[in-house]
Amino acid sequence: MAPPQGQMRPGRQLAVLGLIFTVLYLLVFFAAGAKGSWTDRLEPKLGLDLVGGTRMTLTTEAGEAPPASSLERARQIIQNRVDGRGVAEAEVVTEGNRNIVISVPGQNADLNDVGTPAELRFRKVLKTVDGGGPVNAAPSPGASASPAPSGSPAPSGSASPSGSPSPAVTSSPGAGGGQGGGAPAPTPTPSGSASPAPSASASAAPAAPGDQTPEQQRAAVERKVGAEAWAAATALQAPADFSADPALAEKLKPFADLTPQEIRVLPAGVQFNVPTITCEKLDQRPPGSIKESNQQVVACESGQQKNLLDVAKVEGTDVQDADGVLDQTTSQYVVSLDFTGDGQSKWTNLTREAYNNTDSQCDQAALGDEGRCRVAVVLDNQIISSPEIQGVLTGDSQITGSFTNASANELASQLRYGALPLTFEPQEAQNITATLGTEHLRAGLLAAGIGMLLVIIYAFFYYRLLGSVIFLSLILSAILVFGALVVLGRQIGFTLTLAGIAGFIVSLGVAADSFVIYFERLKDEIREGRSPRSAVPRAWARARRTIISANAISIMAAVVLYLVSAGTVRGFAFALGLATILDLVVVFLFRHPIMTMFARTPAFLSPRVSGLGRALHTGDDDEAPTTGKTRVKEA
């Protein structure tokens, strides 16, 4: 016999709930990211306080403490960089007036570059020399430098304006002597004048870590190498040739003992012309060593080729957006750059200047395969790519290099979030064990288990048969929440912390409220004279509005708390909101349908079994035999 028109079919709701469970756990066991054994696939992503992790402290350079606004801006950028890697529950906080502390769950977290300035500069390559060590042989007289082939040619990039073809920007192998061979001295430029070497006063580098100013730091390095060595180094107009002048090699010998921190304060001409200042030491300079855009600098490419670079005429702030994409023509990952209005004009002017070599600054050794100037894309202290400019570019461009998908997106993320307003030095990085968190977790789970057991015992004692509805609802909610934790941990990086567990426990109170509202409304309907079977849908219709309102308030509170908070508090808010939403799913797809099914059973009519107690004495079931009691008709 079909149910009357308008009467619900509980089997449909239960089937929908079963479908949700099936889809959820198919994602748990078979979706992307599900690896390892079946038990491994059921493990949610745990937070720093539960599984341990990595904590790093970044400190600003010595001197006056930076403004609080700059420190907070740096904290926000670092937080975005960490979150952009898919790390959830990472905590980035300021400590004192110059420290930023980063805490990331997991033992394999890589925090080495989250504090780097990521300052992008586009600089014309003026001179090139081998940076692997001292020169052992002089070039032949009159020999002109030509690009030396390398083991793996530098990838090429392209830049073309929208709607019209444009010359491509291609990277060429660096010029200079091969490894172990001699490097040619820079040949005269077409104008016949050698490229001017930057003076000591014009190439001041940023201060190294310590309490000294840049001038004091440079003076200390001068005293360390000695007046004779300093005078010989600053007098060089081209890379020194030790084989032609052994005495010069002896004079410059003290520079071989300088540390990367001391090398950073040397004039650019000294860094470029002294052979004992190798690319190995230049690459180890602290972050931000060549951040001054109005000075010539020295940077290395591929760890062997040392380049003297012009002032930066296009900067990272001129880049509007950056994305890591796969270049369909070369099948290589590149970083696509969209320039701002002013930035595009600067980029066009720079490519015109490099293409025509208008000021004749690029010497022969620094030119590309087709005799055009190269433009180095410099990130912090290193050259990412140095493409030869083959035309005047009026459109957006790409940074090419030996990128993978991960590295291209990482660089794009750093550029997109902006350069740090401060330069940081990593002070300490330590692995944190989860001993304390594990003890807290055990204590919290034990307390939660005891609390749930007491709730279930009380539910069976007070509601009896209805207590089984409470028990089954809580079990189903827990299974839904657990599956959601596993899937969200893989897809968006959500990690479970002690604060998140607290959020789930608090959500139990919301679930208990909805039980009380429904069951007490059911008793009221029966006391008003309705039969238990007809009281169930009417009680649901009246209680539903209250249940939705109460849960909606909890969800709104969780959303607001999530938006205005940070760190583990956001984990608490997310867990509370998630558990409340899943509780609503169980209420609509399980609790009401199962109550409708229970209302059709004989046990539901028994005051001792059903848990409705005295409420059943105030009204009779329509199918019950007439007794001496006054019959209450249903409206």
Image (tube, helix red, strand yellow):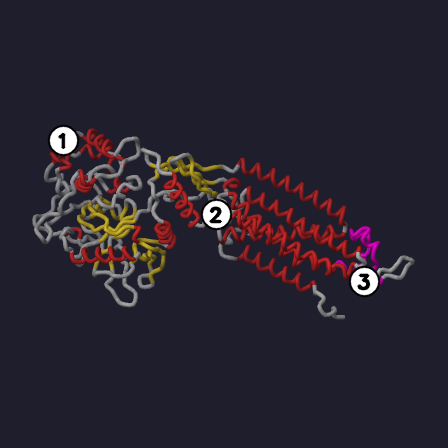
Does the segment drawn in magenta span residue 180?
no
Quickly name the residue at label 2.
88
Place residue 443 in its image quadrant.
top right
- What residue sits right under mark 3 in the picture? 634
Q: Residues within 10 Å of mark 1 (few under 14, many from 20)?
A: few
Residue 102: percent from left, percent from top: 43, 40
Q: Nearer the viewer, residue 354 or 472?
A: 354
Q: Which amino acid lies under the numbered mark 3 shown in the image of this protein? A: Glu
Q: In front here: 432 or 14?
A: 14
Q: Are marks 1 and 3 in contact (CB under 8 Å)?
A: no
User: Residue type at mark 2?
Assistant: Ala
Residue 106 numbered mark, or none:
none
- Residue situated in front as seen by the camera: 528 or 93: 528
The residue under the point 71% across, 46% down is 456
**In front: label 2 or label 3:** 3
- Looking at marks 1 and 2 on the same chain, the residue that comes earlier in the sequence is marked by 2
SS assignment at label 3: loop
**Which amino acid does the dot numbered 1 rest on?**
Glu
Q: Which residue is mark 1?
A: 228
Alpha carbon distance from label 1 to label 3 = 111 Å
- Residue 179 coordinates in the image, percent (x, y): 21, 46
Provide the residue span drawn in magenta.
598-623
**x and y, in percent, of residue 371 in the image:** 16, 57
Of mark 2 and mark 3, the one earlier in the sequence is 2
